[in-house]
Image (cartoon, rainbow, N blue to C red):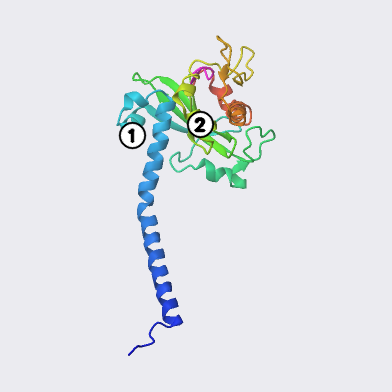
Amino acid sequence: MSSNKETFGRTLGFVLVICLVCAALVSIAAVGLKPLQQANKLLDKQTKILEASGLLADAGKDIVGTYNKRVEAKMIDLKTGTIIEGDVNAFDERADSRDAAKSTKPSSDIAGLNRRADRAVVYLVKNEQGQLDTIVLPIVGSGLWDLMYGFVGLSPDFNTVQSVVYSDLKETPGLGAEVLNPNWKALWPGKKMFNEQGDIAIKIVKGGAKKGDIHGVDALSGATLTSNGVQRTLHFWLGNEGYGPFIAKFRNGGLN
């Protein structure tokens, strides 16, 4: 004897109940894990800033302690280069760049940004004696597939490169993603961003920079568009619509 309990309505109801339960579990997990995700995101940023300032090896596993001891974050107005008040921990450059009220469309958008946030947070890294050793500047610009986010570490003269460190990108593994290769990153320390006339002179050289070229860095093999993106990103952020006003204001000191 059989009973006809498996009706369409019962099956549909069962599926809906399962969907609601699963959706609730996903929502609970997302809310519960959000603090952990934010903590991991902050730790990753602090790690990259320490790498950009040459402190990562010394920090070892104490990333947070070293960061808190040696790094001071400052918010600046990009248009004037002035240090301003603001919550550096809550600032979200990506969110501001999507908000027309908090961002500007560059007149010369060589970095392919569309809009750039009106504010930025820069990182002043001190040595053991408390003297300014490195200024770490966040950078972002188009690569082959999408925007590439990273940091450039400069000496207090705002000219000598200590590092170029990318942290978030979608470039092709083995090609554009070679910006993450330690061998390529090792080409940057000691290069000069500006020439003697004060013009931006850093360049990515296809085929390889000549020996002794203080402004040239080898292009990435097989990744011309990514290489061009790196150069355009640096030229934009060192220029008047990026950190140019900030650099001009503090090039001769005043950040210690």
Q: Secondary structure at mark 2?
A: loop
Residue 158 highlighted magenta (yes or no): yes
The answer to which of 14 and 74 lies nearer the viewer is: 14
From the image, which quarter does the C terminus lie in? top left
Dots 1, 2 in contact, CB < 8 A: no
Q: Residue furthest bottom?
A: 1
Q: Secondary structure at mark 1?
A: helix
Q: Residue furthest right?
A: 107
Pointer 2: what residue?
174
Residue 163 visible (yes or no): no
Question: Mark 1, mark 2: which one is toward the viewer?
Answer: 2
The image shows residue 103 at horizontal and vertical percentages of 60, 42
Q: Residue furthest top?
A: 212
Whether residue 144 sits left or right of residue 177 in the image: it is: right
From the image, which quarter does the N terminus lie in? bottom left
* Mark 2 crowdedness (10 Å alpha carbons): few <14, some 14-19, many ≥20: some
The answer to which of 210 and 236 lies nearer the viewer is: 210
Q: Amino acid at mark 2?
A: Gly
Mark before the other along the chain sequence, 1 or 2:
1
Q: Which residues are magenta?
A: 156-163
State which quadrant residue 102 falls in: top right
Task: Name the residue located 41 percent from the left edge and 42 percent from the top edge.
Answer: 41
Residue 90 visible (yes or no): yes
* Distance from the alpha carbon under mark 1 to that under mark 2: 31 Å
Task: Name the residue located 38 percent from the left edge and 51 percent from the top edge.
Answer: 34
Dot label at residue 64: 1
The image shows residue 168 at horizontal and vertical percentages of 49, 37
Dominant SS in magenta? loop
Task: Name the residue located 45 percent from the left edge and 41 percent from the top edge.
Answer: 87
